[in-house]
Amino acid sequence: MRLPWTLVKTSPACPQKRFIAYLRIFLLLLAGLLILAANALAEPPAKMPEPIIAIVDVQRILQESLASKGVQKQLEVQRSKFQNEIEKEENSLRKAEQDLAAQRSKLSAQVYAEREQQLRQRFLTVENHVQSRRKVLDQSFTDSMNAVKKALLDIVSEVSHERGVNLVIVKQQALWTDQPLDVTDEVLARLDKKIPKIDVVTLPEKPEK
């Protein structure tokens, strides 16, 4: 049985449905407003600081600093001394080889083979000694220059803080620089004052396996 039109129009179920629909729309709008408000109140992203640049010629400092020159000079002395020792040993081996060749006809095959084997062992010992010594000197150079580089970085950091610098670029990596940006002279002077000399430490040789 169909209800009269007036009853359908005033049925209590219809206003309830409309209310629920309006409530949903209101809640959606409210949620949207809250999101917009939250975005408006959010702090803006932190602004990156303006770059304040300094240029350092690291290659020049590592070549011209007093400490670097001292390291190179000390190692040159050690290399020269070692080279003289090796030359004497090589001359001795060469003479022993010549003497053995001259006596070959007077020695039995067994004696000659034994002396030849002894001579080869001497050659091998000298060769191993040369390789071990070279490694020791190379490591001494590396360790000494690392000490110079560490002091250099400390001074660069010190100068940068004093000048308010927040970016230091190695000169060899810059295509062009304006002279006022270059702090190499100041860094070099401070480095020479801080470490005018480094004593090169040479560790004992490790026998080659």
Image: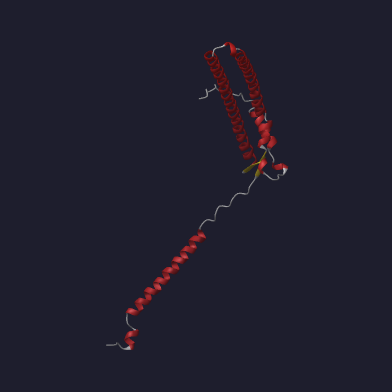
Q: Can residue 164 be seen in the rendering of this structure?
A: no
Whole-percent x and y of residue 151?
61, 32
Quarter of the image for residue 19 reads bottom left
Q: In which quarter of the image is residue 29?
A: bottom left
Q: Residue furthest right?
A: 179
Residue 117, compared with residue 190, is above or below; it is above
- Horizontally, is 110 left or right of 177 in the view? left
Residue at screen point 52% across, 61% down:
40
How is colour applied across the structure in the image? secondary structure
Between 172 and 53, the residue placed more toward the observer is 172
User: In the displayed structure, would residue 2 be above or below residue 130?
Assistant: below
- Residue 177 pos. (x, y %): 70, 44
**Residue occupying the point 35% across, 78% down:** 15
In the picture, measured across the screen, residue 34 lies left or right of residue 16, that is right
Q: Which of 209 and 107 is in front in this view?
A: 107
Out of 156 and 68, give the one closest to the viewer: 68
Q: On the rendered image, what quadrant is the N terminus found in?
A: bottom left
For image coordinates 57% across by 25% down, the residue present is 131
What residue is shown at x 66% (from left), y 43% (from top)? Answer: 173
Is residue 137 shown above or below 93? below
Give the farthest residue toward the top. Answer: 106
**Residue 184, how many percent across, how many down?**
68, 37
